[in-house]
Image (cartoon, rainbow, N blue to C red):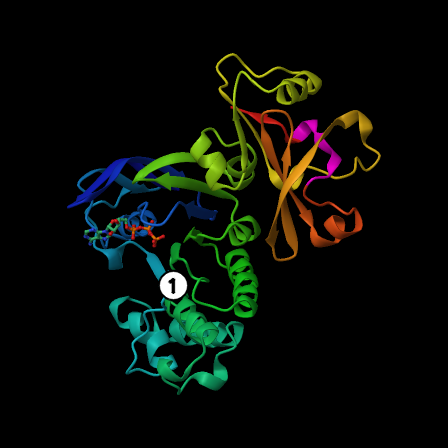
Amino acid sequence: MITLSDVCLNLPGFSLKHIDLSIPTNDFFAVLGPTGSGKSLLLEAIMGLMPITSGTIFIDDKDIKDMPPEKRNMGIVYQDFALFPHMTVKQNILYGVRYHNISPGTVSQRFDTLVEQMNLSHLLTRHPGTLSGGEKQRTALARALILNPGILLLDEPLSALDPMLQDDLKHLLKSLHREFSTTFVMVSHNFSDVLFLASNGAIIKDGAIEQTGTIKELFEQPNSPFTAQFTGMKNIYTLPAASPALASLIRHNGHRPRAEHGHLALRPEEILNENNGKKESCCAMEGVVTRLISRGFFYDVVIQMDAVELTAQWTRHDVLVKQIQPGRRIPFFVPFSSIHTF
Ligand SMILES: Nc1ncnc2c1ncn2[C@@H]1O[C@H](COP(=O)(O)OP(=O)(O)OP(=O)(O)O)[C@@H](O)[C@H]1O
């Protein structure tokens, strides 16, 4: 378990503020947040590359706050790979070994296994400048994993790769996490990567933790308008509902929001354009389409009810087949299970 307690890191112009975080051993943990919110600094603080101003960092029951990075049993992989350009792939992979007390036999065995796993055998004598993005990132991963770190920190490892390579590497990361008994902590901007890879996560805003929990909780049960918006809820309303349509939604839901709940939120992709035979578990509503916003294979369909707008996300196919167009009054369905109040 990595445990950060009341960690502050003050820089001119930016601070990490009173970070409390527990990352279970062997977890795949995601750090999410807007650009400039302090995600990379948080990784650097855990790695020991940035000294913290106050607070404590423990790995299990060991205080590592004053331990140099190379003694923390951690590896780090960056978005821009950070390979040594003058060294071959093989030299890059083996670079860190000299600073650790690992027997030559173990090094050789780990090297062979990693080279095979990462499909690098044909590239060992090449220099990073001649490699594709995916090959560079596989080399960077092998360089980190050859030291068998207890914790692997990944700073946006997929974002410099094209979509095909991202998919390959995403699957590789998943299988590496399964095979190595290593805790993975990954900074990412990409929700689909996070949903595919991570079990737990934290959302960070302006250097402070906004919410932690399982990935499902972060996406389905945000506890603040910021988290709701950041995770793509899109439909966030203040309670008590001024709109009769929203009020009826809450009434249909059966269980009223708790007195302290000030917001209601609905994910756009949970709103249905047909009730799929589940009449009793959905609230049937209707409204007038005001806008269609193309999102590639999907449309954001903006629907005006009474005083409020609601955004649903439907496939291009559904929008075409059901002739959903601005100006049309359409029925839609909100599953009770998708209504979240906080
Ligand atoms: N060494 C440093 N000295 C001073 N300020 C820094 C330093 N490193 C980072 N910062 C500042 O701290 C803030 C947070 O930076 P950080 O790189 O952690 O953000 P991030 O959430 O990872 O952003 P992004 O998603 O854009 O990578 C930024 O405003 C950045 O300019």
| Residue beneath the point at 51% across and 57% down | 177
Q: Is mark 1 within 8 Å of ligand 1?
A: yes
Q: Amino acid at mark 1?
A: Gln
Q: Left of 189 or right of it: where is 326?
A: right
Quadrant containing the N terminus in the rendered view: top left
| Residue beneath the point at 42% across and 46% down | 32
**Residue 199 appears at what percent x and percent y?**
52, 45
Q: Quadrant of residue 243?
A: top right
Label 1 belongs to which residue?
A: 79
Is 202 in the magenta?
A: no
Is 331 in the magenta?
A: yes
Q: Left of 150 or right of it: where is 239?
A: right
**Residue 181 appears at what percent x and percent y?**
48, 54
Q: Label 1: state its secondary structure.
A: loop
Q: In the displayed image of the protein, which residue is found farthest to the front?
A: 327
**Residue 54 appears at what percent x and percent y?**
19, 37
| Residue beneath the point at 67% across and 29% down | 337
| Residue beneath the point at 54% across and 56% down | 178
